[in-house]
Image (cartoon, grey):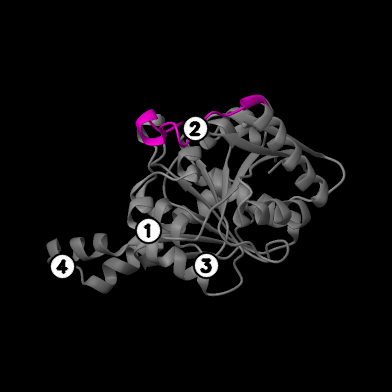
Amino acid sequence: MRLERIVIGVDFSRPSTAVVRWIANAFAPDTELILVHALDLSRPPDFVTGRDLPFDVDTAGEKDRLANRLQRFGRSIRKDRIRVAVHEGRAARVIANVAKAERADLVAVGEHTRRDPLRDMLSTTAEALLALSPVPVLLARRVPEGAPRGVLAPVEPSPVASLVLRTAASLASSWGAPITALYVLNAHWAARIAITSTETKAHQIEERMIASARDWLHSTMVAAGVNADRVPALVQLGEARRDIIAAASSGGTDLIVMGSRGAGGIGQVLLGSVARTVLRASPCPVLVLTNRTVEPALTE
């Protein structure tokens, strides 16, 4: 994957600044970084503030102050190949617009680890970015100490499967890290077939399904240019959301690269259930590619 320019959303929270440091020092140390802060000028109704709580904002002054703060932070990370931008608007749209204007190869955001029911019902900045960004989105709540030591690439039959494998292999190669491909067959499919079958036993049905899935995964890897003889390819019956998290938590995985078919236009901001669950529960950063991801972003 060609990484010449990365746009990173910064709200000055600890997760967002940690992501900048990790990307600059370990994930892509030779890549130009553009740090972006979104100035949200939405205001409460006048009857809430009243005369005692004025809400007047010096927009130009505030943008200059934030740009200076962002510049100081950037210079504390590295002296060159880093730029800053402050724009008015909602964070997801601001970051996506900058990524498009700058022809970025990737956007990244850090996210808070707190949980509350209302927040989980709503689309986070990262999820909204997946509906708006023209390039892959990297979400990190926790970052490893150095470059990823292992990459997990869970795939499913979809238009982005080959792209996921190729991206994961390219990134892993740049770090000298191993990659593991994973396809989780829905266990309910085998159970449903077993119920309706009068001649084939359940374990035979499972064996046949797994064998066919292995063939599909092998051919998909070959088509993606991934060396199927050197890359472990795991196929198992189970539940994708649970098993992807379990595989990533078992040790040795510092990055998940996956696709999502759930993200679409602005009217379909929420992710598919598998990607959404992985984003919220992953023990490591997650790089998500969607149907909006542009194929030329990859090199052979």
Q: Secondary structure at mark 1?
A: loop
- Residue 32 at x, y = what percent? 78, 40
Q: Nearer the viewer, mark 1 or mark 2?
A: 2
Question: From mark 1 to mark 3, how far is it between C-alphas?
Answer: 24 Å
Residue that badge 1 annotates:
116
Counting residues from the start of the chain, the first of labels 1 and 3 encountered is 1
Q: Nearer the viewer, mark 4 or mark 2?
A: 2
Tell me the amino acid under the disc marked 2.
Answer: Pro
Residue type highlighted by circle 4: Glu
User: Helix, strand, or loop for circle 4?
Assistant: loop
Mark carried by residue 199: 4
* Residue 230, image quadrant: bottom right
How far apart are labels 3 and 2 at the CA level?
A: 49 Å
Placement of 115 over or under 171, stated as above or below: below
Label 1 to label 2: alpha-carbon separation: 30 Å
- Where is the N terminus found, in terms of image quarters? top right
In primary-sequence order, the first of circles 3 and 4 is 4
Viewer-proximal residue, 116 or 136? 116
The answer to whether residue 235 is visible is: no
- Residue that mark 2 sits on: 54
Please determine whether, in this image, residue 298 is positioned above or below residue 22. above
Residue, disc 3: 248
- For the residue marked with disc 3, what is the amino acid? Ala
* 142 in the magenta segment: no
Give the residue type at disc 1: Asp
Label 3 – label 4 distance at C-alpha: 38 Å
Q: Separation of disc 4 and disc 2 at Cα?
A: 77 Å
Q: Earlier in the sequence, mark 4 or mark 1?
A: 1
Q: Position of residue 49 (x, y in %)?
A: 42, 35
| Disc 3 element | helix
Magenta extent: 42-60
